[in-house]
Amino acid sequence: MGVQVGAEALARAEGQASAYLSQKINRDDSFLDGPVTDNKCEARANAAREVGKAYQKGLVDRVDQQCTDAAKAKQGQGSRGRRQRRGTRSHPA
């Protein structure tokens, strides 16, 4: 599950990076500094990809930890088995 959600985070980050790169004008737009707009677009795209990678790692790690915790809790129940949820039944009027 964590791998799937992590892959979704990467896909969203790549989509955002593509959106930033689509704004490049491919020419110098500053007399002294060169292609300022293009450099900003590339920096934003790289930042989006890095954030996506960080989210992927964090999501995978968190889901793995939750799975480990759930497995430990299940082992701790021993012979008691699963607790069943009690609810109220509605009776026809």
Image: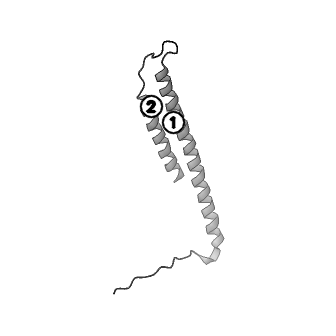
Query: Could you give the CA–CA distance between mark 2 and mark 1, rounded to whole angstroms?
Result: 9 Å
Classify 55 as above or below 62.
Answer: above
Which residue corresponds to the image point at 55% horizontal and 36% vertical from the top-left? 50
- Tag 1 or tag 2, which sits nearer the N-term? 2
Reply above or below: 87 against 31. below
Determine crowd level at label 1: few under 14, some 14-19, many 20+ residues with C-alpha closer than 10 A: many
User: Residue 8: percent from the left, percent from the top?
Assistant: 47, 46
Task: Using the image as rendered, state which of residue 37 and residue 82 is in the foreground.
Answer: 37
Name the amino acid, label 1: Ala
Specify the farthest residue to the left. Answer: 93
The chosen color scheme is one colour
The local secondary structure at tag 2 comes to helix
Residue at 49% over, 44% down: 9
Location of residue 40 in the rendering, given as x and y in whole percent from the top left corner? 50, 26
Residue 34 at what x, y percent from top left?
Answer: 49, 15
* Residues packed near mark 2 inside 10 Å, few (<14), some (14 to 19) or many (20 plus): some
Q: Position of residue 56 (x, y in %)?
A: 55, 45
Q: Residue furthest bottom?
A: 93
Numbered circle sitting on residue 5: none
**Amino acid bearing label 2:** Tyr
- Pick the residue in front: 30 or 39: 30
For residue 7, above or below residue 63:
above
Describe residue 45's horizontal placement relative to residue 70 as left or right: left
Q: Which residue is mark 2?
A: 20
Q: Are marks 2 and 1 in contact (CB under 8 Å)?
A: yes
The quadrant the C terminus occupies is bottom left
Along the horizontal axis of the image, is 68 left or right of 90?
right
Residue at numbered disc 1 = 48
